[in-house]
Each structure stands twice: as structure tokens, then as C-alpha cells.
Amino acid sequence: MRIRIIDAFTDRPFAGNPAAVCLLDTDAWPDESWMRQVAAEMNLSETAFAYPLPEPADADWALRWFTPAVEVDLCGHATLATAHALHSDREATGTVRFRSRSGILIAHTRQDGTVTVDFPAAPANEISIPGGLPEALNAKPNAAYSTGALGDVLAVFPDEAGVRSLAPAFTALAHLTRRDGIRGVIATAPASDPGSGYDFVSRFFAPAQGIPEDPVTGSAHTALAPYWSGRLGRDSLTGLQASARTGLVHTAVHGERVHLTGHAVTVLDGTLHHPAGEEHPQADRADLL
């Protein structure tokens, strides 16, 4: 069974956010324990599994995402990576509809390989700064916001340098997020230089989900886009996720939806030698491109 590692929200290898993508030649989900084992073996922030749906259906593919520790409800970069795999493997240009735990998600791939994913917006509502958050982040944000169904806390800092220099205490942050029932913490600030090519910066921390710091988080931009569009007065913006790998996410707010656009690059194409149903599934990472 074929499996790929695809760097999303970047146009160069070894940047952006890597996702493993497994396109299944089945008409139903394999055993969930197998998918969890594959995701743990790949040890990336998310591994995506998809299988084609028969016609007529409300979507073209069923899609699920797993971290090394849990299944998640929404993942932007692995959705973009899956659309990229379909474009590369099956020449699927145009619109692809995915059935997911967050409803029907739409991805549109252009001839140049650029992918736009259409996700539900996550409007931010201001809350009190959660107790223990400044200590867990080793810095105090100016304000904090809830993000509704997304399940994150959006922590707003005064400047880009403050976000870039964050050094969280991950054990404390994991305890706090479990205590408060949140997925993770989005740290953000305006870009320090208006001519830098991006409008805002962010970082994303979700240690309780098995992801201390995610390199580029598409789903977090469903909250970042409406927040910064409201603050900056423009519907179309560009966000830089300032992780060690970095990545650019172009955002456009369309009412209750957010369009996230980026590139993707396949860096590994290999064979999974233990398909679903075998006793000891293991991933053989081969054929580095």
C-alpha cells in the first residue's frame, strides 16, 4: 500500500508542515487500531487516510486524520496534502469534496498545483486569560479568545518578536489544556514589517494532542483569518506560521467560511508493507525524493 509524506503550505521541501497521506483502495474504513498504529509509526503531526466514495454521494472521498496520539476533528495541512496527492497521483484538478468529522470540506486544485481548502470559520470571542496560561507560555498575552468548535485558545501578543521568542513549558501547557478541555493554544501577533510579505504571525502548541509545536496549522487559520481580517479591515491576508520550518497560509474570509491556500511538495513516496488486517503493521519509509 502506497504512503507519502507531503510538506504542506510550502513550495520547497523540508519546510511547511509534513503530513503522511494514505489513499485507500477500499470502500470502507480499515480497522481504526491499524490507522492509529500507522499514525504513531509515521510520528508526524497528522496522518491522513482517505477512500473514494461511490456515486451518487455528498462527497468524493471520505477523510480522517490522526496525530500520533489521537484522532482529530479538523486538519488543514493534511487536507491540503491529500488534495495534492490526488492531483499528483490521479491528476485530479478542480474541486474535490471530502466527507469528514467536520462535515463536507472542499479542496480546489489549480493546474499549477496550488490548493485552496474551504473550511468553516471559527470566530474568536474574547475571554479572560486562562489561569496558568502565562506561566505555561512563559509570557503573558495581551488578550485571549475562545474559538468555538475549533477548541483552541487564541492568545494575542503585542508584537512578532514576542511570538517568535515563546518557549513554552510543555508539561504545564499539556496539563492546562487537558484541564480546560481545549485542543491547543494559538499564539499570534501582527507582522512587524508591513513589507515582509505577510500580515500576521502565529505559532501553535498542542502537547496534550501529542504535538508540542505544530509547524504550520491550517485549522488554526480558521480562527486567525476572521480575527485578523476584522482587526486589519481586509478579507484576504497572508499568515506566516513562525515555527522552525515556517510556512505561509493565504487566507480569505467568505462569510462563515474561510479559504486557505498554499502549495505542497511530496518529499517521500513509499510502500506500507503491512496493510490493514495484518498483525504487526509497520511503515517502510523509502524512496526519498
Image (cartoon, grey):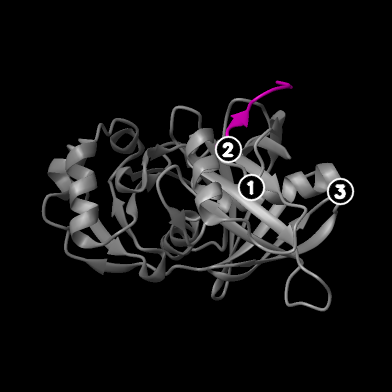
Q: Identify the residue at horizontal 81%, vertical 71% (top origin).
A: 54
**Which one is closest to the eye, mark 3 or mark 1?**
1
Q: Residues within 10 Å of mark 1 (few under 14, many from 20)?
A: some
- Amino acid type at mark 2: Pro
* Above/below status of 271 relative to 260: above
Q: Residues within 10 Å of mark 2 (few under 14, many from 20)?
A: some
* Residue picked out by circle 3: 90
Q: Identify the residue at horizontal 60%, vertical 32% (top origin).
A: 283
**Which of 267/234 is in front?**
267
Q: Mark 3 falls on what kind of element?
A: helix
Q: Is residue 214 left or right of residue 212?
A: right
Q: Is residue 180 visible in this depiction of the protein?
A: yes
Residue 121 rendering spot, x and y as whole percentages: 50, 68
Residue 181 figure quarter:
bottom left
Q: Which secondary structure is most common in the magenta stretch? A: loop
* Residue picked out by circle 2: 281
Q: Is residue 182 left or right of residue 58?
A: left
Q: Outermost residue, front direction?
A: 279
Q: Is residue 271 left or right of residue 104?
A: right
Residue 259 rendering spot, x and y as whole percentages: 62, 61
Residue 215 rendering spot, x and y as whole percentages: 47, 37
* Residue picked out by circle 1: 276
Q: CA distance from mark 1 to mark 2?
A: 7 Å
| Part of the protein shown in magenta | 280-289
Which quadrant would the N terminus be assigned to in this image?
A: top right
Q: Are marks 1 and 2 in contact (CB under 8 Å)?
A: yes
Residue 64 belongs to magenta span: no
Q: Mark 1 falls on what kind of element?
A: loop
Residue 137 rendering spot, x and y as whole percentages: 21, 40
**Which of 275/142 is in front?**
275
